Amino acid sequence: MARNTDWTHDQHVLAFHLYCQIPFGKIHQGNPRIIELASLIGRTPSAVGFKLSNFARLDPVHQARGVTGLTHGAHGEEDVWKEFNGNWERLAQLAATLIAQLKAEPLEATVPLMPWEKKLTGKEREALVMIRVNQRFFRSSVLAVFDYRCCITGLTEVELLTASHIIPWSVDTQNRVNPQNGLCLNTLHDRAFDRGLLTVTPEMKVKISPILLRKEKDAAIEHHFTPYEGIIIPTPPHFAPASEFLSYHNKHIFRNDN
C-alpha cells in the first residue's frame, strides 16, 4: 500500500487488528510489531503508533479515563470500531487475509499446520486454516490484555501461558474470538479453570473450589491454589473480561461443592 495522507479502510482494519494485540502501555513507534505493520502498509512507525493510540479514545475503559486521542481520521477509526467490535472472527480473518496479500504469500503460511493437517484438502483445509487464524488472534489478544502474564500468579513464561475461554468455545460460538471472553492463565490454572476448580467473579476475585480447599494435606494444592483464594485481579486497561461471561462461569462451570 502506497504511503499517502488518508488512511484506507483496509489500513484501519490492520491497525485495529494490531491494537487488539498489543498491551496498551507498549503502543509506541519502537514496538517491533508496529514497525512491521508500518513497513507493510507504507507508513511510518510513528504514524501507526498514533493511529493505534487513537483507537483508545473509542475504548470504553479509556473513555472513562478521559482519553480523547486525535481528531484527524476519526471517522475511519469509528467506522472500523463499529464494524468489528463484536465481529471478532471477521476482523481476525480479514486482517490475516490482508497481511497475507501484502506479503504475497498464502494465508496458511501465517498459521503453520501440523503434518497430518497438511494432508487435508479443499474446503476442509480452508476451514481449518480459518480456525487457526481465529485461535491465533484470540490467544494473542488475550495475552496482550494481561500484558503476557498469568492474571492469577503473575507467571510470564509465554510458553506456559494459555488464553482461557471464560465461556467455553463449544458453548458460545458468537464470542469464541472475543478478547473479553478470555483470561491469561498458566497451564495448571487454565486446566483448573476449565474444570470448574477455580473461577473469577465479576468483581475479578479469584475463588478456589471447596473440592480443592478441603484437601488440607495436599502440599501441592496448598502451594499452587490455596494462597490465591480471594485475591483480586487488577482490571486490565482495555478489553477487560466481560462481567456477564464471568457470571456464566461462576454459575454454570464453577464447582462450588460443599
Image: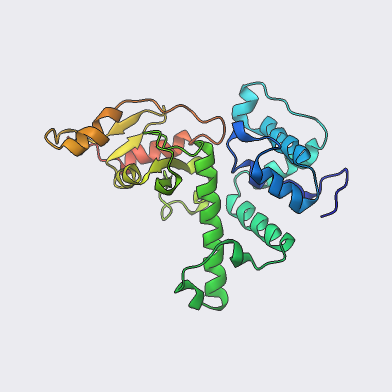
Quick check: can you spot residue 10?
no
Q: Dividing the picture into quarters, in which one does residue 200 lie?
A: top left
Quick check: can you spot residue 96?
yes
- Report whether 56 appears left or right of 179: right
- Report whether 253 appears left or right of 97: left
Q: Dividing the picture into quarters, in which one does residue 90 lie?
A: bottom right
How far from the left and from the top, in percent, is residue 223? 23, 33
Q: Is residue 134 above or below residue 179?
A: below
Q: Is 14 in front, or is 37?
A: 37
- Report whether 183 appears left or right of 238: left
Q: What colour scheme has been applied to the protein in the rendered image?
A: rainbow
Q: Looking at the image, which residue is at 76% across and 37% down? A: 46
Q: Is residue 9 above or below residue 233?
A: below
Q: Is residue 165 above or below residue 156?
A: below
Q: Residue furthest left?
A: 217
- Image quarter where the N terminus lies is bottom right
Q: Looking at the image, which residue is at 21% across and 37% down? A: 221
How far from the left and from the top, in percent, is residue 149? 45, 37
Q: What number of labels is visible?
A: 0
Q: Is 149 in front, or is 228?
A: 149
- Image quarter where the C terminus lies is top left
How far from the left and from the top, in percent, is residue 216? 13, 32
Q: Dividing the picture into quarters, in which one does residue 230 lie?
A: top left
How far from the left and from the top, in percent, is residue 83? 68, 47
Q: Residue furthest right?
A: 5
Q: Looking at the image, which residue is at 59% across and 28% down? A: 61
